[in-house]
Image (cartoon, rainbow, N blue to C red):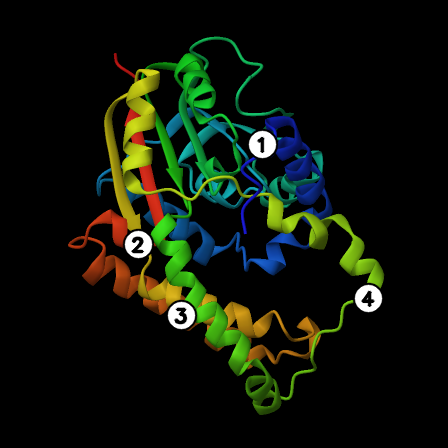
């Protein structure tokens, strides 16, 4: 459920800051974020497909918007695809988590707490502006894209992945309901315990504010129109995940009803590896041939004129 259409930009930003601060410590485990070989392969594949099927040369100076705990940028930097990384987020808690992970990976990073619509950087400071699952949190996208253009050097690129589509949200509703209905049977089969939230947990910011943090669900036409308005050229939008989306949301909906420490490791391995398998089906068979409108995540890239 997205934020109210009457919510002000200041309210949306406040909610996003408080929610992501509260969620920062558990975010990676909740969403299965990996900073090893699997995570690196995932983000490299996203980058390659977003850029038209060819892996670009390593970026010199990269700016990530809404970096969160660093899934996208740290996995790219770990492979040498980013030389100098600046990670931004509206949530200080998320950036503290990112810094901790960057330290463990040996990846140098500069972190800056800022919103996307007013970036505290000089003109033409970066070779790429990138993000993952961030645009749908930003109230004023036209202002944000104008800032992306300003801080990019001529010929620089924007790369955004993992954004929810309007059709994908509707599609995901079916496996979510199915997973919820099957959850009691599933818990008995794997001998997991039903998750019980305390009153304190239900009242904390992570649980209470989650329904309000999303602002947009895109159709590809939305994303094709925004960059040219800001001055970008060569805008490209393609789709990501169809079968994997259906499977993944069904699995996640069941798992969300169980106490995490009672879910057996073999089940977790099966759920995760099967999801990765369906991702490969999407990439090899569906994504190259079906229109972007059918998929759960649009992938967006564009360039600043030389």
Residue drawn at point x = 64 percent, y = 38 percent: 16
Tag nearer the camera, 2 or 1: 2
Q: Secondary structure at mark 2?
A: loop
Q: Which labelled disc corresponds to residue 295?
A: 2
In this rendering, position of residue 52 left or right of residue 276: left
Name of the residue lying farthest toward the front = 6
> Whole-Å distance between the Cαs marked 2 and 4?
36 Å
Residue drawn at point x = 71 percent, y = 52 percent: 208
**Are circles 3 and 2 on residues that touch, CB within 8 Å?**
no
In this rendering, position of residue 127 left or right of residue 259: left
Q: Residues within 10 Å of mark 4 (few under 14, many from 20)?
A: few
Of mark 1 and mark 4, the one earlier in the sequence is 1
> Whole-Å distance between the Cαs marked 2 and 1?
35 Å
Of mark 4 and mark 3, the one earlier in the sequence is 4
Of mark 2 and mark 1, the one earlier in the sequence is 1
In this rendering, position of residue 226 left or right of residue 90: left
- Between 45 and 228, the residue placed more toward the observer is 228
Where does label 4 land, which residue? 198
- Between 175 and 68, the residue placed more toward the observer is 175
Residue drawn at point x = 69 percent, y = 74 percent: 259
Tag nearer the camera, 4 or 3: 4
Name of the residue lying farthest toward the bottom = 189
Indicate the position of residue 150 as horizontal and vertical percent values.
42, 12
Of mark 3 and mark 1, the one earlier in the sequence is 1
Q: Secondary structure at mark 3?
A: helix
Where does label 3 land, which residue? 247
Q: Residues within 10 Å of mark 3 (few under 14, many from 20)?
A: some
Tag nearer the camera, 3 or 1: 3
């Amino acid at each position: 459920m997205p934020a109210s259409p009457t919510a002000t930009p200041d309210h949306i930003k406040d909610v996003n800051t408080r929610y992501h601060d509260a969620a920062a410590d558990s975010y990676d485990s909740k969403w299965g974020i990996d900073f090893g070989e699997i995570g690196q392969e995932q983000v490299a594949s996203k980058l390659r497909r977003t850029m038209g099927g060819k892996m670009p040369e390593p970026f010199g100076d990269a700016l990530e918007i809404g970096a969160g705990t660093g899934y996208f940028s740290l996995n790219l930097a770990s492979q040498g695809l980013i030389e100098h990384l600046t990670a931004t987020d509206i949530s200080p808690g998320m950036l503290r988590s990112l810094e901790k992970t960057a330290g463990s990976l040996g990846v140098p990073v500069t972190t800056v707490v800022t919103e996307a619509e007013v970036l505290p950087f000089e003109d033409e400071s970066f070779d790429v502006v990138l993000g993952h699952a961030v645009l749908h949190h930003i109230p004023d996208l036209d202002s944000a894209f104008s800032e992306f253009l300003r801080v990019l050097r001529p010929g620089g690129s924007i790369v955004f992945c993992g954004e929810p589509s309007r059709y994908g949200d509707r599609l995901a509703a079916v496996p979510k309901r199915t997973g919820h209905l099957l959850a009691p049977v599933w818990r008995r089969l794997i001998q997991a315990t039903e998750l019980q939230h305390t009153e304190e947990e239900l009242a904390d910011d992570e649980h209470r504010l989650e329904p309000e943090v999303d602002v947009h669900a895109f159709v590809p036409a939305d994303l094709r129109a925004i960059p040219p308005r800001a001055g970008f050229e060569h805008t490209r939008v393609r789709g990501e995940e169809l079968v994997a989306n259906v499977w993944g949301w069904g699995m996640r909906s069941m798992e969300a009803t169980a106490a995490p420490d009672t879910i057996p490791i073999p089940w977790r391995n099966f759920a995760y590896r099967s999801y990765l398998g369906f991702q490969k089906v999407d990439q090899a068979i569906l994504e190259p041939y079906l229109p972007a409108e059918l998929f759960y995540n649009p992938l967006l890239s564009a360039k600043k004129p030389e």
